[in-house]
Amino acid sequence: MTMPPAPTDLAAIPGTTADRALGALYGVALGDAMGMPGELWPRRRILDHFGWIDRFLPGPDGHFVVDGFVAGQVTDDTQQTMMLAGAILAGGGRARGEVVAEHLVAWADRVGATGGNFLGPSSERAIGLLRSGAPLEEAGVRGDTNGAAMRIVPVGVLVPSDDLDDLVDQVVECCRPSHYTDIAIGGAAMIAAAVSTAIDTGSVRDAVRAADRILDRAANHGNPAPGASLRRRLSMALSIVASDSDDDAVLQELYDVIGAGVATTEAVPTAVAIALMGGGDPVRTAVLCANLGGDTDTIGAMATGIAGAAGGFDAIPDELVATLESANDLSPLRDLALGLASHRTATSTS
């Protein structure tokens, strides 16, 4: 990918902020790659085929999306996260809908993302409309699935947690091209607020509280779409996680009651709850998501992005980072994370 010019004040980033910014973006890749083998398989099929996933595995033979993927390979979740981070930096450290749209279409063209099973329904529809010259709000007016939330971690890295109004504004800009509905914006704001708070506090519990609070600010943005309450689904998910049941039973209850599909109202509350269940440990969080069933790579990307923001890059073992980097072109990821963190630091001190 083409990188925008790097900011000149990287040395001003506090070490903790830099570590957690890196942890957030590498957390996306970790959760994505760990969840890749069982992507969109029912939970029972994952359990029958793999047993318990606790390491990187290749895509299963004949899988309708990831057949031929090697162990540690990421999906479009990480690719689109990197795309969005690059679009924000290209916009001078601000999310701008038109720039995001340009980068989204350019990414899809570069990797041949459309025309197969690679993209979610909202993104694929929006990219086709954008190519035809449709205005942003028309392209994204029906997008209510989890594609906006899955790639939104860069906004959480960019915006400090004491400026949640600006965070929502930038989430909205990121959602305009493909997911301009109140549900998608609300879900994306939940993930971004959780990441931002985790970077500032190092606490996944604080991050979960921020994910709930942000809905008051995000609720009135975008085209109204029918769907379940994100807040009530999150409350139910957190109650399930708070039970004394073992990991397998908790995951089954989340899968059965909250859901693990591509709907924002399923994937986002489940991801936030598993981030809490993982206790800020990126590896444990990624493993839990991989064994959940459903949209394992996307839920893994979101939940482990939050966990990585809380635990930091140092919480991800070197051998897992090495596998991720050997299986994928993640060479821009460090500069993207530090570039976003540089703008965050400049905002918080201005």
Image (tube, helix red, strand yellow):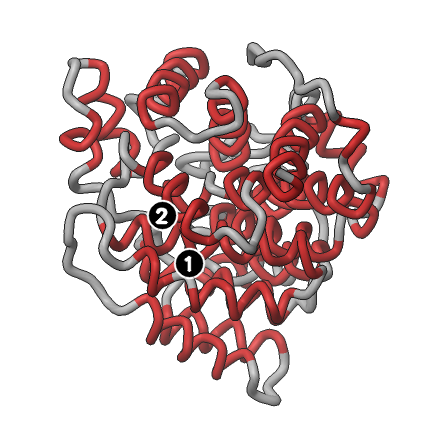
Q: Is residue 74 above or below residue 171?
A: above
Which residue carries the number 2 mark?
Answer: 146
> Residue beneath label 1, please?
268
| Residue 109, visible in the rendered structure | yes
Q: Position of residue 285 (x, y in %)?
A: 64, 60
Task: Indicate the amino acid at tag 2.
Answer: Asn
In the image as oriented, which residue stretches furthest toward the front? 350
Per the model, the C-alpha gap separating discs 1 and 2 is 7 Å
Which comes before the other along the chain, label 1 or label 2?
2
Viewer-proximal residue among 14 and 120: 14
In the rendered image, is residue 57 in sight? Answer: no
**6 to 315, vertically: above or below:** above
* SS category of the residue bearing label 2: loop
**Does residue 320 appear to the left or right of 350 in the view shown?**
right
Query: Around disc 1, counting alpha carbons within 10 Å, would you say few (fewer than 14), some (14 to 19), or many (20 or more)?
Result: many
Left or right: 348 in relation to 267: right
